[in-house]
Image (cartoon, rainbow, N blue to C red):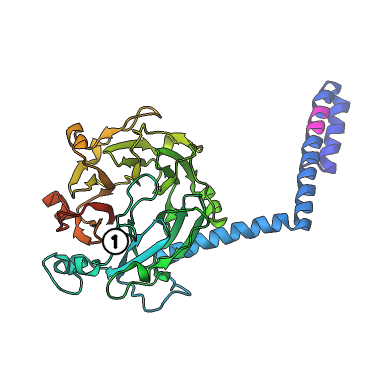
């Protein structure tokens, strides 16, 4: 602070010790430079405020923070959902089945799955028998579903009724909506009663991601079908979501975005390929630019990506229903940015045609859901799946096409 008293002190200092004059002048000159710079900054802010640009920026920040706060309140059930069907019970959970064409089916299940364990026995013909519920679902909404890198079969995501869903299209466009805003299926599940999140032009719906807890994440990692990944800090991701666009996250023209993983600080990301390879990377070392990570064969592509978190183990599920369980210590962090990854099963099984449909970090308290190519939906506790080592989907003429867990 420069005040009259300070100036008088400098004058006396110069009179008594003339040799100190250069230091005092130098100090004053530096201070004047700082004041001039600050003046320019304030002038720029005044211009922005007059033009409305700064005000819009502040409003956008407030809106973003309010959105994150609303998501946390909803997760903690501290505030009822607005503009969402009121009949949605707080003690329910939902399985979403969705296609690349933007069709979405919501199957409502009890929140306490353990208490309703007997209802999910395939031999039970009761109202919760999931095989009966799903008898009309086709693999991708049409006969003879595709299963190549472009035009994947339906996928599953499992959430609570208070979740927020982010619809991610392969163009990088995003749409957010409360889970309970998607009407639950009544009676037999059929694509004719699907909720539609319409793609624009040639877009495909790449993923539906629960983001209700994104304000608790440290970073969000986007993965492509050809094994490219890009890390986004949570603050940047929230800004992108507010603008309904996070980018496609690809480099190659024929590549497509595949999914998003919400990661904690110092987490690990796992990529799962269709032909049976997994790649593990420390999220702290990931780039904020799109980077190539996994060396894939010409016919291979990523089918799943997930954060390991604090779960003790991981599972990989094959098209013929095998559940492959590995302890977290089995995951070996890739030492380079271009790696073949770890083989999940032997080369003999790969040559025999075994393929992966998904993977997840799990413990025995989780529940799993699998969808087969005939449209049958199987729900089972992870404890049972790990005990039997397979998903019992009851048809030798069908292959599993999707897998998801509820933690």
Quadrant of res 298: top left
Q: Which residue is nearer to you in this view: 353 or 104?
A: 353
- Magenta-drawn stretch, dominant element (helix, strand or loop): helix
Magenta segment boundaries in residue numbering: 25-30
Is 196 within the magenta?
A: no
**How far from the left and from the top, in percent, is residue 256?**
44, 44
The kind of secondary structure element at disc 1 is loop
Q: Is residue 42 left or right of residue 246?
A: right
Residue that sits furthest to the top in the current view? 19
Q: Percent position (x, y) of residue 326?
A: 20, 41
Numbered-mark total: 1
Can residue 10 be seen in this snapshot? yes
Given residues 206 and 200, the one toward you in this image is 200
Farthest residue, direction front: 143
Q: Residue furthest bottom?
A: 87
Q: Which residue does the image show at 20% across and 32% down from the upper left?
A: 347
Mark 1 — residue? 138
């Amino acid at each position: 602070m420069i005040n009259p008293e300070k100036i008088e002190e400098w004058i006396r200092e110069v009179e008594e010790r003339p040799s100190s004059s250069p230091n005092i002048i130098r100090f004053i000159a530096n201070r004047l430079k700082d004041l001039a710079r600050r003046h320019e900054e304030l002038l720029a802010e005044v211009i922005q405020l007059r033009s409305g640009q700064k005000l819009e920026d502040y409003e956008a920040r407030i809106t973003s923070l309010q959105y994150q706060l609303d998501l946390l309140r909803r997760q903690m059930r501290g505030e009822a959902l607005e503009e969402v069907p009121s009949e949605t019970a707080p003690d329910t959970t939902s399985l979403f089945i969705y296609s690349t064409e933007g069709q979405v089916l919501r199957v409502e299940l009890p929140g306490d799955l353990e208490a309703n364990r007997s209802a999910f026995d395939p031999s039970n013909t009761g109202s919760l028998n999931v095989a009966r519920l799903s008898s009309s679902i086709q693999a991708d909404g049409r006969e003879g579903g595709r299963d190549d890198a472009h035009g994947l079969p339906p996928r599953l995501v499992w959430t609570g009724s208070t979740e927020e869903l982010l619809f991610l299209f392969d163009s990088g466009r995003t749409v957010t909506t409360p889970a309970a805003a998607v009407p639950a299926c009544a009676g037999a599940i059929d694509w004719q009663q699907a909720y539609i999140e319409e793609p624009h032009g040639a877009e495909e719906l790449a993923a539906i991601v629960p983001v209700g807890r994104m304000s608790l994440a440290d970073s969000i990692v986007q993965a492509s079908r050809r094994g490219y990944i890009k890390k986004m800090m949570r603050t940047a991701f929230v800004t992108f979501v507010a603008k309904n666009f996070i980018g496609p996250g690809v480099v190659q023209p024929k590549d497509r975005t595949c999914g998003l993983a919400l990661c904690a600080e110092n987490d690990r990301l796992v990529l799962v390929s269709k032909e049976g390879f997994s790649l593990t990377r420390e999220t702290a070392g990931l780039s904020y630019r799109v980077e190539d990570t996994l060396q894939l064969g010409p016919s291979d592509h990523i089918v799943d990506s997930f954060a390991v978190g604090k779960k003790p183990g991981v599972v990989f599920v094959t098209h013929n229903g095998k559940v492959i369980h590995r302890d977290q210590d089995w995951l070996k962090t890739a030492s380079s940015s271009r790696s073949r990854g770890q083989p999940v099963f032997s080369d003999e099984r790969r040559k025999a045609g075994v393929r992966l449909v998904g993977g997840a970090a799990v413990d025995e308290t989780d529940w799993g859901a699998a969808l087969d190519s005939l449209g049958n939906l199987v729900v089972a506790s992870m404890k049972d799946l790990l005990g039997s080592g397979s998903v019992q989907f009851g048809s030798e003429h069908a292959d599993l096409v999707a897998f998801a867990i509820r933690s």
